[in-house]
Image (cartoon, rainbow, N blue to C red):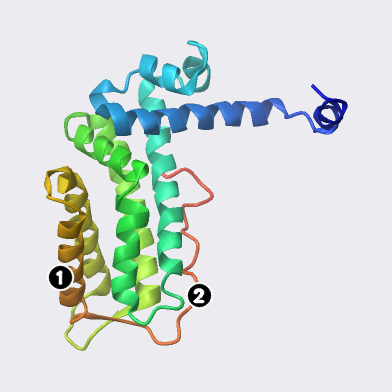
Amino acid sequence: MTAASLKSAKDSPRRTQAERSEAMRQRLIEATVLCLESEGYAGTTVSTIITAASVSRGAPIHHFPTKAALIEATAEHLIRKIYIQLGHAIRTMETSDDRLTDMILASWRELFDTTESMAMMELMMASRRDPELSAAMRKLWTAGYATLDVATRHYFEPCDNGMDATQLFVLTHWLLGGMAMERHLTNGEHVIEHFLQLWCRVLGTHLRPRPGVNTPPPKPTFWDSSLTDPA
């Protein structure tokens, strides 16, 4: 180690116990995301998480009392990460001539074609047979719906046909989720692109961007609290 690197290490402020604890929590959560995406829910065991995180065997027990608690924290992490990715997708609209199409195409790339999305789908499928996980996922889904509602009404308005903008985007969310689930069965990305463009044309007959809106939507109300706390 050089004198410069020694000085840098000496000058760097030492992390507090709380900071070290939070860093370990995040390390375990991120390892859980990777395991869910690569091994599926059934294959995501405490042992595989420990291996992926490169931590001691006692680390998960120290930071999460049960595997269910770690999975719940991971699900909440995914919702927040997906919200940030949605923000990236939304930013493509600022200079777009076709905001609706660009929003949906960007959503596919930023939200559904990601490790986080695949991990979330594993949890959703598993929650069908796990009441505890189902209860947590239901609260997360409700928070996600509320976020989608705020963003949709901020950027879009229905055409003069009585259709509800948020409900149309919920349908879009379900459509993209189903496409992501079956993507490995298609004959290539051009198939996905074709149906995304088709849906954009259908949706364009019912929705239009609000004129002059180029600011981000309000911050979700849940952001500064836990999504799965009891109501």
Q: Residue at x 43, y 17 (%)?
A: 51
Which quadrant is the C terminus positioned in? top left
Q: Earlier in the sequence, mark 1 or mark 2?
A: 1
**Is the residue marked by circle 1 packed among few (<14), some (14-19), or many (20+) residues within 10 Å?**
few
> Callout 1: helix, strand or loop?
helix
Res. 200 image quadrant: bottom left
Q: Which mark is residue 11?
A: none
Q: Which mark is residue 198?
A: 1
Task: Tell me which amino acid carries mark 1.
Answer: Leu
Viewer-closest of 228 and 175: 175
Q: Is residue 21 left or right of residue 153?
A: right
Res. 32 image quadrant: top left
Q: Which mark is residue 215?
A: 2
Task: Tell me which amino acid carries mark 2.
Answer: Thr
Image coordinates for residue 121, horizontal then vertical, percent: 25, 41
Q: Residue at x 54, y 50 (%)?
A: 224
Residue 228 in view: no
Image coordinates for residue 210, horizontal then vertical, percent: 37, 83
Residue 189 to residue 60: above or below: below
Residue 177 to residue 73: above or below: below
Q: Residue at x 16, y 65 (%)?
A: 194
Image coordinates for residue 22, horizontal then vertical, percent: 59, 31
Closer to the eye: label 1 or 2 = 1
